[in-house]
Amino acid sequence: MMKHPGIPTHLLSTAIAAIVALATRNSQAFAPISPSFVAKPHSKLNMFTGIVEEMGKVVSLETKDDMLLWDGSRGKGTEMVVQGDVVMDGAYLGCSISVNGVCLTATELDFDNNIFKVGLAPETLRKTNLGNYATNAKSSDADAVDETKLLVNLERASEIGGRNSGHFVQGHVDNVGTIIDRWIDDNSLFFKISFPHEYMRYIVPKGFVAIDGTSLTVCDVRSDGPGGENWFTFMLVEYTQKKIIIPYKDVGDTVNIEVDVLGKYSERAWEAFVPKMEALQEKVESMERRLKELESKA
């Protein structure tokens, strides 16, 4: 259990229960489904499960200087075209599709060729590895293309309240991690990921983490803070190895990482709760001192 100096254990237990309640209440992922979400078409909430439905392929990644903007003017923007079969089933303009764990909006759909187009905002390019696909397929042989470097994990948005074999994934990547080691353990494949220290407080052994949009379980964790070692490991069972792009990646490659959002909600609720607990503790101690004073005078 999390400890705080000077705060009794029973108060900590109460605080943790309150944190869970607040996180659940404030997280859209746990909100009850209202009737308005049941019957209307195209009403799926933009959440994912981390269970990759298929491996798609990047057809093109292009930055243009003459893209039409919302106000009718022209500006710079980046667009990606992706080929996928499963995710095109039920797709519609404006729907959300997870591409390597990034929640993106479909802006154009071509059902004849099973391809869709999405826009990549500057923040998306800064925080994810999607911008690397412009050079990923280049080879030392000018005529050769490494098709595996064009693969992406794809998943359609899910309705909250349905079955979830992974965990609640928003598609809001926190940052990229770097593969620093990989090894085989019987039929399992292990990866060791270096990750910025400021996010490591959300990475816990046996906790959830989304890697390139795949819901996975954290194995080992080391977090030494700024200047130290900050990494975690995860493993892929044989079945998963065949269904996602991560096994195609080598040491030095990057992966998109989204930490478990419940950890963030818990931290925010805890930060708001601790000052109140400390104030209550101070009042209790003040009352105890006053009681002792009265008893000594009796």
Image: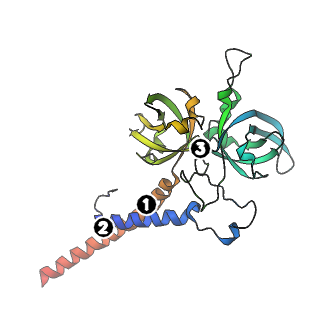
Rendered location of residue 31, percent (x, y): 58, 66
Mark 1 residue element: helix
Rendered location of residue 201, percent (x, y): 43, 47
Q: Could you tell me how far apart the alpha carbons at marks 3 and 1 are, in whole angstroms?
A: 28 Å
Q: Amino acid at mark 3?
A: Gly
Of label 2 and label 1, which has the lower sequence position?
2
Q: What is the number of the mark on residue 135? A: none
Q: Could you tell me how far apart the alpha carbons at marks 2 and 1 are, in whole angstroms?
A: 15 Å
Give the image quarter of residue 112. Answer: top right
| Circles 3 and 1: CB atoms closer than 8 Å | no
Quadrant where the N terminus lies?
bottom left
Q: In the displayed orientation, state which residue is furthest to the top.
A: 141
Q: Amino acid at mark 2?
A: His
Give the image quarter of residue 148. Answer: top right
Number of the front mark, 3 or 1: 3
Quadrant where the C terminus lies?
bottom left
Of label 3 and label 1, which has the lower sequence position?
3
| Circles 2 and 1: CB atoms closer than 8 Å | no
Q: Which residue is mark 1?
A: 270
Q: Could you tell me how far apart the alpha carbons at marks 2 and 3 are, in whole angstroms?
A: 38 Å
Number of the front mark, 2 or 1: 2
Badge 2, how many Cα within 10 Å: few under 14, some, many 20+? few
Mark 3 residue element: loop
Task: Report the front residue among 203 and 7.
Answer: 203
Q: What is the number of the mark on residue 213? A: 3
Q: Which residue is mark 2?
A: 10
Q: Amino acid at mark 1?
A: Trp
Q: Residue at x 66, y 31 (%)?
A: 132
Task: Report the front residue among 124 and 257.
Answer: 257
